[in-house]
Amino acid sequence: MSSESSAAPAASGVSASGDTIFGRILRGEIPCDAVHSDELCLAFRDVAPQAPVHVLVIPREPIAQLSEATAEHQALLGHLLLVAAQVARQEGLNSWRTVINSGAEAGQTVFHLHVHVIGGRPLAWPPG
């Protein structure tokens, strides 16, 4: 979907320190075009958009991928989806796609959980 990039080895998407490019964005070390920020997450425009609107919603808590989320993350996961919908509407979308890649074989390259919000043009199915 996106040309997600990480300052990390391709095998795991995580640097030797366990950090990713999204961690660096959250700490303000790398600038982003933020469209939403709250105590639980940050949403910003993808640097390699796949559609006129392509926003990433990331939790401030470093969860590597959806398959590592637990029951204690239930409220956070719901919040990410609600923010994704809010951002889509804020961007003027009536229809959009939300995508969560979980694992390298699914196309995840940055191993910090993130929700893609993609829209602004017709999207084909199946993706990929």
Image (cartoon, grey):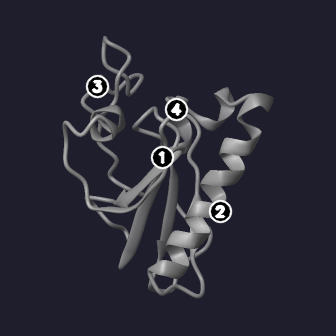
Q: Estimate the spatial distance between the alpha carbons at disc 2 and disc 1, rounded to whole Å.
A: 12 Å
Q: What residue occupies the far right of the structure in this picture? A: 71
- For residue 1, what is the image quadrant? bottom left
Q: Estimate the spatial distance between the alpha carbons at disc 2 and disc 3, rounded to whole Å.
A: 29 Å
Q: Estimate the spatial distance between the alpha carbons at disc 1 and disc 3, rounded to whole Å.
A: 18 Å
Image position of 111 (left or right of 63): left
Amino acid tagged 2: Leu
- Percent x, y for residue 93? 52, 85
Element on which disc 4 rests: loop
Give me the residue at 25% from left, 54% from top.
Answer: 32
Image position of 77 (left or right of 105): right
- The answer to whether any part of residue 92 appears in the image is yes
Give me the residue at 48% from left, 52% from top.
Answer: 38
Give me the residue at 67% from left, 32% from top.
Answer: 67
- Percent x, y for residue 24? 27, 34
Amino acid tagged 3: Ala
Identify the mark nearer the N-term, 2 or 3. 3
Amino acid tagged 1: Ile
Residue bearing the label numbered 4 = 61
In the rendered structure, find residue 58 and report the number of the disc placed on it.
1
In the rendered structure, find residue 8 and report the number of the disc placed on it.
3
Residue bearing the label numbered 2 = 82
